[in-house]
Every structure is written in structure tokens, then in C-alpha cells.
Image: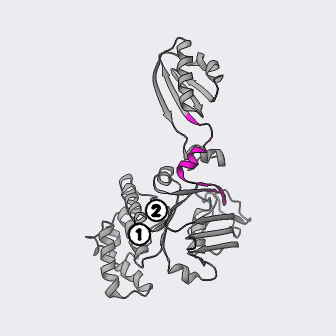
Amino acid sequence: MPPAIETRGLRKVYPAPPTRRRGTRGPQIGPVSLPSGAPPGKEILALDGLDLEVPAGEFFGLLGPNGAGKTTTIGVLTTRVRPTAGSAAVAGIDVSANPVGVKQRIGVVPQRPNPDRQLTAIQNLLFHAAYFGIQRADSLPRAQALLDQLGLGDRGESKVDQLSGGQQQRLMIARALIHEPEILFLDEPTVGLDPQARLDLWDILRSLHGQGRTIIMTTHYMEEADRLCDRLAIIDRGKLLALDTPAGLRSRAPGGTLVEVTLDGDAAPLLPAVQALPGVNRVSASGPKLSAYAQRVGEAIADLIRATEQAGRLPLDIRLTPPSLETLFVSLTGRKLD
């Protein structure tokens, strides 16, 4: 079986954006976000030799800030964006040589819901099914089953504007699934949703993945990537910076686990002794709180307690914060994920 997704040396250069008037926002070409700091008059490198391989059945995430190249990658894989160089294949089909064959095997949930607002929810699904040549006798029960599965069973006759933001996004997922694709693409699927709608959508995506479906998702939410994805690719400025399971990526975060010890007095006098402990680095103190990063947590806690007691201080509380995707991202890019 070929990989669900495979790219080799994928490169995309957008033409130079026009000069912007003062006070306008950064350049955009269609729905693809480009770096806001890109100077006018210069070409924009959105993808810079991207190599990816995603096996069938995986829940795969592309993690990065706006303008990192995530949406361009999805655009190439879904045939909306033509690559400048390199190759990309979906289910073994070259996206440039046979875009029709690719479209028949994929479902796409765009970053912003784009249903036909003149139609009802179920009419949107039926219209999309007809586009793929599905007869109404087959598409009508399939559409109702999808609405039921996604918690919209009683909203089939509702116009789109009568649906909440979360319901509209679920309608987009139903539309993407109506022709029973092998691979589901979701571009920032929970942007703009309230916390409860986001959690509800997570449950739906877990259920779809549990049915064996391959899911490719872009996101800039750390928790979302961590909770949903089997593997993650961290990309920034069009380059692949890291690729692993969420746990594997966290283990690569520099500095180790954060150990915070709250004492019964000022922690500052302990800094020299704690800094000298083996395996402890980046030590700081704020009032009664002593903070240190440690690679070997068990040994570090014992050493920290011993050092505090020798200094005549009593540890009142100990808190541990394991390495995170956020700390890894900052170490790779030099900036936070916004």
C-alpha cells in the first residue's frame, strides 16, 4: 500500500506581492496565509524542500504559526496550489499529473466554513454528492446518516445561517465525507470555535480516526496537536524542523523538567548551592519559590530537598512541569507559537 501522503523536495514560491498601502495588513494570496513581514516587491518562499511521508490510517498534524507553510502544504496536497518544484503524491497519485484522481480520494475541510448559504444543511451535502456523481437514491440516506453521526440530525432543513459556528464546521466535515474519501484534510479546523465546540469537534475527529480514516490536520494549538495526533511535523518558514510522536517531541525539549519548590522563606540565598548541583540548570528564585530545570528529575528532587534543608529552609510544596511542545518549538524557531 502506498503512503497516504508523500512529498519530496516540495517547494512553493509565490510571486512578489504588490506594494501595500500604509496601514494595511500583510499579503495574502487567496486563502493561503503568507508571512506578514514579507517585503513588497520580493518573491515569497512558502515551502522550502519539504519532505513528508504519512502512512495510511495515521492522524498526522502539521504544527506551526501562521505563515509557516501549513496551509500551502495542504493546498498542494489537495490540488489547489501548484508546486514550484519537487513532488507530492496522495494515495500514490501525483497531485500535478492527476489532480482529478486525487480529488476523488480526499475530503477537505477548509480553514473557514464555505457552505452555500442559500441551501439547507442537507441540500449542501446532496449538492456536493452530485458533484462526485453520487445518485440521489444513495446520497440522501448517506447525508442523513452523516448529519446524525455529527450531531446535526435535526438540523437538516436548517439554513446555514441558522447554525452555530461549531455546527457549521461539523457540516463541513459531513460535506467532506459524503463521497467516502480515503483521506480527510482539515486546515485549522477549530479556529474561532468556543472551548466546548472545540472539545466536541475533537471527539468527532477521534471517532473518525477510530474508524480507520487517515486524517491530515494543520493547527497552531499545542494542546490540540498533542491530544489528537499520532505524529506531528513542526514546520516554520516552509521548512520541516522536527517530526515525531507528541511524546517523542516533548522528550527533545531542552532544559528538562521544570521543578518548582516553594520554601518557608526567601529562596534567593540557595541559588549558588542549587546551581552547583549535578544535572540542574537554569535556576531562578522569586520570593519563596525556587525554580530549576533538571534532566533526571528523581535525583534532582532529592538533591534540592537536601540543599534546602542544609540552608535551614523547609520545602512546603514541589511542582513538576514536564517538557512541552511549546518549549521545543521555541528552541527550534526562537519564537513562540502564536
> Which of 276/217 is in front?
276
Amino acid beneath label 2: Pro
Q: What element carries label 2?
A: loop
Residue 194: name its quadrant. Answer: bottom left
On screen, residue 316 above or below 72: above
Picture coordinates of residue 175, whole percent (x, y): 40, 74
Q: Residue at x 65, y 62 (%)?
A: 21
Picture coordinates of residue 278, whole percent (x, y): 64, 26
Picture coordinates of residue 157, whole percent (x, y): 28, 75
On screen, residue 48 above or below 107: above
Q: Which residue is drawn at 50% across and 57% down?
A: 230
Residue wearing tag 1 = 173
> Which of 219/204 is in front?
204
Q: Which residue is drawn at 37% across and 70% down?
A: 171
Res 118 seen here: no
Residue 212: name its quadrant. Answer: bottom left
Res 139 seen here: yes
Residue 159: name its quadrant. Answer: bottom left
The span from disc 1 to disc 2 (Cα, nearest Å) is: 9 Å
Residue furthest left in the image? 154
**Residue 235 part of the magenta-drawn span:** yes
Q: How many neighbours does mark 1 have within 10 angstroms: few (below 14), some (14-19), or many (20 or more)? A: many
Q: What span is colored magenta in the figure?
A: 234-257
* Contact? badges 1 and 2 (CB < 8 Å): yes
Q: Classify residue 210 as left or right of residue 290.
A: left
Residue wearing tag 2 = 189
Picture coordinates of residue 112, whole percent (x, y): 47, 66
Q: How many neighbours does mark 2 have within 10 angstroms: few (below 14), some (14-19), or many (20 or more)? A: many
Compare marks 1 and 2 and give the one earlier in the sequence: 1
Q: Quadrant of the N terminus?
A: bottom right
Amino acid beneath label 1: Ile
On screen, residue 91 above or below 19: below
